[in-house]
Image (cartoon, rainbow, N blue to C red):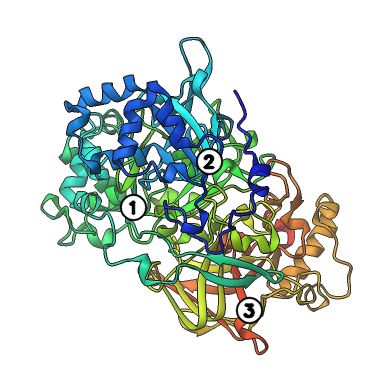
Amino acid sequence: MKKFIFNIMFFVGIASLTIPSVTSCSDEPDAENYYTFTGQMMSQYLKTNEDLSLFAKIVERAGLMDQLSAYGKYTCFAPNNEAINHYLDSIKKPLEQLTDADCDTLARTHLINAIYSTSDMGNFNNGILTTQNMMKRNISVSSTLDKDQNAVIVLNKHSQIFFAFQNDSVENGIIHRVNNVITNSVNSIANMIKNNPEAKIFAEGLRATGLEILLDTLIRDKSYNRDNYQKYISYTTGGNIKERAIAPEDKLYGFTAFVVKDEVFKQHNATDLQGLYELACKIYDPMYPEDATGPSHGMDSLTSPKNPLYRFMAYHLLDRNVQSLSYLTVREDVCVDPDYANPIDWYTTMLPGTMIKCEHLINRKWVGSSVFNGYYINRRYDGEKYTKTGVKVDNPTEAVDAINGIYFYVSDILKFDKETQETIDNDRIRMDFSTIFPEIMTNNIRMQGNFDKGDGGADRENITDHDIGFNYFFPAGYLKGVTLAGTDAHFLYRRPCINYYSMFGDEMIANGVFDITFNLPPFPFEGDWQIRLGFAPMDPSQGASRGAVQVYYDGQAQGIPLNMDIRVSDAQIYGSSTFPTYSSIREDDEARQADFKILKNKGYYRGPFSVYHTSSKGKIGERFADQASTVRKVLCTVTISKEDLKKTHTLRIKNVSTQNAKYKEAMLDYLELVPKSVFGVGGESGSEDDL
């Protein structure tokens, strides 16, 4: 494959080119960025290649040709004339009968505001491009062999890039010719499932419970308008680093469905709605015995949230669009050491009070079968004590990127039963903060951009490239269950960068004189639980901007304020002893236990041994457990009763710094919910695992 190289020196030599000072997420470049180059632009390429003349007409009618004549960084997937004619035949319209709006949709579907070579796209095999097309829709990427046995890229499952016409560079981007018009579905996720002949029983369950209505009608929050907010905000973070953040462009609703095929239901003797209801009763009557004889029980009450069939279907649904199979856990397994752990994420389901555990098998130690490198739900396997292999998740062969979500096939039914509670949920639940709020995933914000680019100090203020990614601030009401008060206070998502001392390279920040409250994920069962915060304390002598925060659980203050500037190596925490790297004592049982005890007595834990910081993607660098500046702090220990399981609990974090308070921030990297079965171990039984 030819490797595209962007000729940056050409741009440096042009004195009249203006560097943008405002971060924008618009498809239209700012006026000061327009510049007509002497080399061939994308517009000229389309106009002068006869085999692309029909697509050129479509782009012209869409009013985009001037944009493609100007400065920018674009990728164009250009269908040749044969592909356009095939598409027109399929919709039974000549080109002349397409409206300008039709042409606009077609053109924007094939254009991306970022540059992707085929070698770049190869990194996302069986995933999606990290930048959406100009219609704000995902483009999936896979690979195959063409008729000449050349390795080629396939887009949205059916549009193949021609090997001989890939990576054609122009002054403002790169062009790949494709053999089929790229399309995105305009159906809702409910309609896509309903039209699937292999999932009739699942679709009937959605219809009968009324969940189909939600999956069919919730598309976009029309009350949200980004123009009502600042175009960007400037802020200072970390070691006095100046950055900018933008508000999300849209507020979309999203769903993910784990669809059970009819053939799988038949293995459970569920061949129709009645059989599906009886299957649901077997699972959920023991879990909710108080409702088993109540008015919500029965085939005539299927739309009640307390009905067993409603609960069964809701547990197969997430109120977020996870975008693609490869996003079920952290993209590209970044910064997770495969020698010690699998990437894991936890998501709340549409069955209140429940979560599912999603795991990507990249660690052979925990495989337990010949299947490798797959995605599983509710798995806990170590070959000894835990042998629950979980439910495998697969991509359907058909395109499933609906206008408001996505669905996957699962190898078996998902169920929230006693075994799930006692085996899967009875573990340390670690959640990256960006997964706690569904809107961040649904609106294609989490883990977007290039991990390797843009960490350039003050230059971060000038980043406008979609391929690098954006930092986001969330206006009031954007994130469900979040309230923010205070002077010049903002709640931010910092795009992923492998050079950050944060899990997966991304993090959330509350800054200014902030007072933020958010809903906690549900506790899966009764008992004592620790709530821990993973974050990176920073030394004030290095210009850090953390500070002191007061933590509240359900409105009640928890202990004294937490000083987020103090590292665990500080004498206030570790005492007079020299703070060792964890790797140096990990094999010494006595030293490791002593270290664990010192920190636990002060309410601290080292960062996870399986997570690392690096300055080069794919290269294992500094382990979090070895760093005094990547820690976990116990915010509080709470007792959850049976009645508490039915409630929504909150965490409040308030800036209580007394000096330069408006420049302080709370770094919210990841949250841990830890049952007593995990945090209560000690003495002869050893200590909690370090992963």
Mark 1 sits on what residue? 254
Mark 2 sits on what residue? 172
Residue drawn at (79%, 60%) of the image: 593
Name the image quarter holding the N terminus: top right
Quarter of the view holding residue 221: bottom left
Kindly state the secondary structure of the residue where label 1 is placed. loop
Ranked by sequence position, the earlier of labels 3 and 2 is 2
| 268 to 531, vertically: above or below | above
The reply to whether dot 3 and dot 2 touch (C-beta < 8 Å) is no
Kindly state the secondary structure of the residue where label 2 is placed. loop
Ranked by sequence position, the earlier of labels 1 and 3 is 1
State the residue in front, 337 or 516: 516
Percent position of residue 394, x then y: 42, 33
Ranked by sequence position, the earlier of labels 2 and 1 is 2
Q: Is residue 245 left or right of residue 179?
A: right
Percent position of residue 687, x then y: 70, 58
Q: Is residue 397 left or right of residue 292?
A: right
Circle 2 residues within 10 Å: few <14, some 14–19, many ≥20? many
Which amino acid type is marked by label 1? Gly
> Between marks 3 and 2, how big is the CA–CA gap?
40 Å
> Between marks 1 and 3, how big is the CA–CA gap?
33 Å
Q: Is residue 593 left or right of residue 158?
A: right
Which amino acid type is marked by label 3? Lys
| 140 to 245, vertically: above or below | above
Residue drawn at (62%, 38%) of the image: 6
Percent position of residue 616, x then y: 72, 45
Which amino acid type is marked by label 2? Asn
> From where the camera sits, is residue 144 visible?
yes
Q: Which mark is residue 664?
A: 3
